[in-house]
Structures are given as structure tokens and as C-alpha cells.
Amino acid sequence: MNTATPVVLVTGAGRGIGRGIALQLAAAGCSVGVNYRSNADAAEAAVEECKSYAPHQGQLFFALQGDVGDTESRNSLVEHALSLFGRIDGLVNNAGVAPLERNDIVDATEESFERLLRINLQGPYFLTQKVVRYWLQAKPKALLSGGFKVVFVTSISADTVSLNRGEYCVSKAGAAMGAQLWAQRLAGENVQVYEVRPGIIATDMTEGVKQKYDPLIADGMVPQRRWGYPEDLGKAVRSLIEGDMAFSTGSVIHVDGGFHIKEL
């Protein structure tokens, strides 16, 4: 059980953006709960990689199975993390899914809509509630600079229309508002809440659209003219977890190579 180093639970941390975040938090000296839903091998590999990044012997890393879209599994995830680490100081809501099929909103199904909102919106919203209740009831002393931290990883799709995956856009827009709600509620409770909004990031989720986006990125759709990488997200989240923006609760951090800039 850990009592000396801050503990951060990162959902969907077995691969992609979540793994990039977990590695940077390990490098920052945090113990990390590497949550996964079904790919145990990827999560265990992420745990071993975290260990190679860790500067302190006292850091702990565990792979924690849990489906954030399921109430019982979500609650068990938090209880399991507390039993292994003894505490939680930060939560990174990263886990999410894309539609199984990209369909025009005229043809989209209610089943797909419900699935994405349950996992991408309802999951992080109520996982945050579970962790916050622990903070408010147990009243542990925060080990992170500036207090406890919650980070919602959303997407440029929170405010950028994609007509062939409308349910994804709606889920991320909802998560963005969720971050604002929790930031306001917890501002006086020694908890800072942030939204990190990734752009076009090179992960296994985007591998299938790489040929589409390569020329668009090269032509300037992303002003910095490159793909983003999980490490880019990891460094941004690390800065927030370390307390570099402790007086900026509710902030939206764009990690998109300038995609969000409006130009006339």
C-alpha cells in the first residue's frame, strides 16, 4: 500500500493517449493506476513501461480492470484502486470509444448513440462523482501541489462537427460541460478540474483514417502541420497534475497543433 507518493487513476491507460499520460505521470513521480476494460496484456505492458519511467522506488503501478460505462464495474474500480494504493490524489478521465460504424446522422442508430454516451459521458461523470465522494468523506491530505486534480480528456469533436459520427461529437461536448460543472462544484474543496482537448492524435483509433488526414494535415488543417502524439497529451496532463495551473480550474487546454485557431 502506498502512502508516500501521490496516486493518479488513469482510465483507458493500456494504450494510446491514456498510456502516454500514464508514462508521463510515472516520470513525474506519481504512482499510477492503469485502468483497462478488456486488453489485460496491453495494460500489463503499460505497467512495466511505467516502471521504467519512474524516478523513485516507492512508486507503485497496477493494472486495474474496469468498464467505466458500467455502474458496478466503475464503482469497483475505485474501491480496488483504494485497496491497492491506499489513496487517490488525481483522476484522469481518458477512456472512450468511437462509433462501431460511421453513419450519417440521418442513418445513425439509437443503440450507437446510447453506447457512446454511456461510455464517453456517463462513465467519466459518475466516476468523478465516486472519487469526489471519497475526497469529501475521507478527507485525505492531498499529496499533489495545489490540491486534488481531475482531468477530462475530451476531443476537438466537442465543438467541431463530424456528420458521420454525431453521437461521438455529442458525447464529447457533454464531457466538456461535465468538466465545467465539476470545476465549479469543487472550486472551494481543494480540487481543480480541467479539460484537455486533443486534436488529431496518432493512435490505433485513428490508424484507419491516416490516409485521409495525412494530406489534410500537410496542407495546413493543423497549423503545426503534424500529427499529435500520446506524449503531447501526456506532457500537458503532467503539467496539470503537478500543479502548474493550480489557479486555473475549469480551463480548457487545447493540444491540437493550433487546430482550434479561427482564421478569417
Image (tube, rainbow, N blue to C red):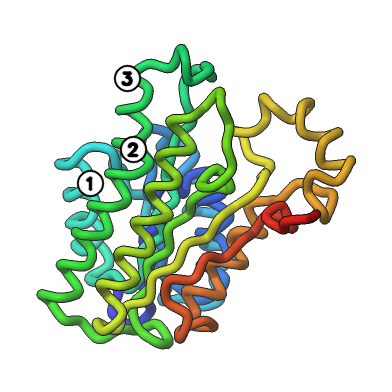
Residue 74 is tagged as 1
Q: Is residue 207 left or right of residue 93?
A: right
Q: Give the residue furthest to the top.
A: 107
Viewer-nearest of labels 1 and 2?
2
| Tag 3 secondary structure | helix
Above-or-below relation of 245 to 211: below
- The percent coordinates of residue 10 (x first, y second) are 41, 56
| Tag 1 secondary structure | helix
Crowding near the residue tagged with mark 3, few <14, some 14–19, many ≥20 C-alpha atoms within 10 Å: few
Residue at 19% of width from left, 62% of height from top? 83
Write down the residue under mark 3.
110
Residue 216 is tagged as none
Comes first in the chain, label 3 or label 2: 3
Residue 119 is tagged as 2
Q: How many labels does the image show?
A: 3
Which image quarter is the C terminus in?
bottom right
Viewer-nearest of labels 3 and 1?
3
Crowding near the residue tagged with mark 1, few <14, some 14–19, many ≥20 C-alpha atoms within 10 Å: many
Q: Distance between the residues labelled 1 and 2?
A: 11 Å
Query: Looking at numbered disc 2 in the image, what kind of residue is underneath it?
Result: Ile
Q: Quadrant of residue 191?
A: bottom left
Q: Distance between the residues labelled 3 and 2?
A: 14 Å
Above-or-below relation of 4 to 155: below
Query: Looking at numbered disc 1 in the image, what kind of residue is underneath it?
Result: Arg
Query: Looking at numbered disc 3 in the image, what kind of residue is underneath it?
Result: Glu
Comes first in the chain, label 3 or label 1: 1
Q: In this view, does 226 lie to the left or right of 17?
A: right
- The percent coordinates of residue 63 (x first, y second) are 37, 50
